[in-house]
Amino acid sequence: MLERIWCQFISQIPVRNSNLAKTIIVSVIYKALNVIVQFVLIRITLSYLGSNDYGFWMVLSTIFTSFNIFDFGLGNGLRNKLTQALSDNDYVSAKQYVSTTYLALTGIFTFIFFTGFLAWPFIDWNWVFNAISVPKETVNLITLVTLAMFCLRLVTNLLTSILLAIHKADTVELINLIINAVTLLSILLIKWSQPTSPLFITTFLYGFIPVFVLIIASLYVFNKDVRIRPGIHYVKRDALSALKGLGSQFFILQICSMIFVTAPSFIIAHLFSTSEVTTYTIVYRYLSLLIVLSNVIIVPYWSRITEAAHLNNFGWIRKAVMSLIILWLVGCLIATCLVLVSDWFFDIWLGEDNPKAPWMLTLITAISVMVMIFNTIFSTVLNAVSKIRLQLFLGVLVAGSSIPLMVVITQQFHFGLVTIPLTLILCMVPTLILQPLQYFKVIKGEARGIWNK
């Protein structure tokens, strides 16, 4: 049945060219393989580090992962501007945008690293992560390595925005698959060799491997596609000004997204324990299969929608959004099935390392995930057409209210870990109402004031 629904969905995708359906199908294949690798990687890492160290590492990993999008909005700004330049066959502007963004990010993150390096010795990192069971020297060294890898990752990860701008979402998924596969092989190797500092080595591998793979991939892509190959002589101040106007707004959204993503792990670590971080993370990773699948399908649409809006083809955008909403309804059915078989799956997946997550936690987390996916459909369209001012206010509201609400509800009602996804749902209610409303105003040409900014 699901196969028939999927085939029908693919056949009805309103493609702007024949490559869109191919991109989605290939991306799904790569992502499916990637999910398998990630599930194996989680089990191997959990059994290798143990529940407490894994919980600490997951808090740090969540921050590291969320910071991957923290590029001061320049990545998304570049994505929109590069798509528009290539649509107009303006290859000089395309190279200027790419070259200027690389130089700007290199300068910014060089400054951030040295600033963080100077402040690093004066911060009690054990208190920050509530890592009572981890030696102070180990935590300090891990945070310094994470800072260095974070800065390198943010610069090299700009390749993702470039590939998405040129409609190569499948290549992005292939790169992610290679990163996780190499990481899995490396973790298996160090588990076999039994080093003296497993937590540090695990952190280093998770940070270094993505940077290395992205550097190799960047050299290959820029050698193959001369239209976007950066060069120091293409760096222009005017290009940076064009990127900053849009990028500054994306930057605020990225900060809000980072807070929203990292807050649960921090709150759980401080109000519960790092071992409970493991429980929540296992449930969230399991249900993030839905986020993974939705992103594989939604992400290629961003640059296509930017191109369609640039050419005033709003009819295509309407059909695309309707197809995504239909697929979201199918996702709700899949989410129901995942919740029903969750206990059985956790036993098979984790074996004796299964943290025995409460069924209600799985159910509420599934609902929060589906609400998040629904919001993503409309935020993607609005981001693609650069109508993000309302999102800025909503993002600040959601991010600013999420942490205090988690703390207050947890302490007052004693619902346990269920409080976390329940609070996330409450925080997303404003976006659940206002983003679709803004989309319909924009698509009908009725947007005025803040609805059109």
Image: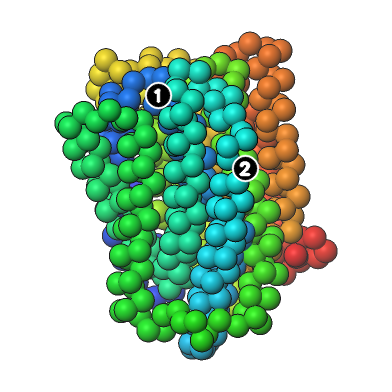
The answer to which of 72 and 415 lies nearer the viewer is 72
**Which residue position is annotated with label 2?**
119
Q: Nearer the viewer, residue 145 or 222?
A: 145
SS label for mark 1: helix
Q: Nearer the viewer, mark 2 or mark 1?
A: 2
The mark nearer the N terminus, 2 or 1, is 1
| Vertical placement of residue 155 versus 95, above or below | above
Q: Quadrant of the C terminus?
A: bottom right
Q: Secondary structure at mark 2?
A: helix
x and y percentages locating residue 336 in the rendered image: 42, 30
The structure residue drawn at horizontal position 73% and vertical position 34%, both measured from the top left corner, is: 401
Q: Residue at x 37, y 34 (%)?
A: 200
- Name the spot of residue 104 as percent of width and height, x first: 58, 69
**Which residue is at the front of the view, 199 or 141?**
141
Q: Residue at x 65, y 46 (%)?
A: 256
Q: Residue 158, position in %: x, y? A: 47, 64
Q: Which mark is residue 274?
A: none
Q: How is the image coloured?
A: rainbow
In this rendering, position of residue 53 left or right of residue 320: left
Q: Is residue 90 above or below residue 76?
A: below
Residue type at mark 2 is Ala
Classed neighbour count for the residue bearing mark 1: other residues with Cα under 10 Å, few (<14), some (14–19), many (≥20): many
Q: Determine the image quadrant of residue 194.
A: top left
Residue for badge 1: 53
Residue 283 in the image: above or below residue 99: above
Q: Residue at x 70, y 40 (%)?
A: 398
- Amino acid identity at mark 1: Asp
Q: Relative to residue 204, is residue 265 drawn left or right?
A: right
